[in-house]
Image (cartoon, helix red, strand yellow):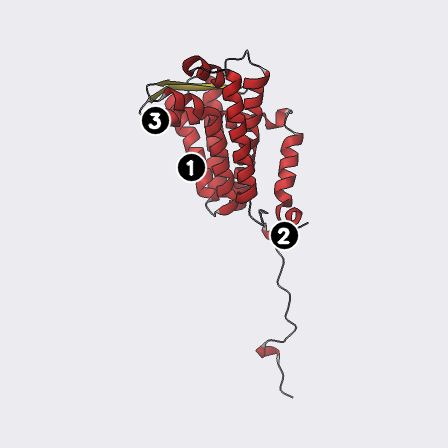
Amino acid sequence: MRVLRGHWQLMVLGVVVAALWTTPVLVPLKILVVFLHELSHALAAWLTGGSVEGMTLSPMQGGTTTTRGGNLFAIISAGYLGSLLLGVVLFLLALRSDLDRWVMGVLGGVLVAVAVAYMREPFALIFCLGAGVVMLGIAHFLPHEVSDLALRLIGLTSMLYAPLDILDDTLRRTHVESDAVMLAREFGGTSQFWGGLWLVISLIVVALCLRFGAGRDSNLHLPMFRRKPRPSGRPHARDRRPR
């Protein structure tokens, strides 16, 4: 009962996302998670001394990142696990900090910057610019609760999308050219091995995040739902009358 009372909003959000998972409603959000996947490849390239030549997204929830140099093992591995970790970070920042508007603004700025620097195909450019501008607008003009809720939604979707995408791309559809196939080709093993390893890691990370990151109370306390203090029943000094 305490878990339900302390996390009912998060549970409702999870149920809504799950119910709409296969509908067009969540497609923009899924494409945003694909952007986090491709951004993770780019971050791995930069952090290991490489460079990014280009990046793109497709309306079919696909994407590619072209890199040069860097550690190939880290770059390939970073896609699924990196988007998962970015989702966890966004989720925890929304739950455990008051930096919601700053984080939303930074995420919007990253979308715009990456679009301008690396996106050349019309869909990818328009999507990233549009999403970035919307996020910047939310961060600047709307209350921080809106940024908080949006970050929770993005983080939770990324945490769900990563293991489901790993399962679909590397274990169910083994013929698909996925990160696991490329890793197996370059470093040995099978795509099922790498996909299975990533799946186990992702499930552990999600479980740890929900178990220890949510705390005792993850609900977003909106002003309309805050309880007003009860009157003490004792009159104020100015209301007292001499007997």
Q: Nearer the viewer, residue 190 or 145?
A: 190
Q: Earlier in the sequence, mark 1 or mark 2?
A: 1
- In this rendering, position of residue 77 left or right of residue 174: left
Q: Secondary structure at mark 2?
A: helix
Write the residue at 42% across / 29% down. Answer: 112
Residue with the most extreme left position: 49
Total numbered labels placed on residues in the image: 3
Residue type, mark 1 in image = Val
Q: Secondary structure at mark 1?
A: helix
Residue type, mark 2 in image = Phe
Query: Which callout, 3 or 2, points to the residue nearer the camera?
Result: 3
Tag 3 residue: 46
Tag 1 residue: 106
Q: Quadrant of residue 61?
A: top right
Residue with the most extreme front position: 189
Residue 110 image offset from top left, x and y in percent? 41, 31
Q: Is residue 202 above or below residue 174?
A: below
Residue type, mark 3 in image = Trp
Tag 2 residue: 225
Q: Earlier in the sequence, mark 3 or mark 2?
A: 3
Q: Secondary structure at mark 3?
A: helix
Give the CA distance from mark 3 to mark 2.
Answer: 45 Å
| Contact (Cβ within 8 Å) of mark 3 with mark 2 | no
Residue 131 image offset from top left, x and y in percent? 49, 30
Write the residue at 63% across / 57% down. Answer: 227
Q: Is residue 136 above or below residue 33?
A: below
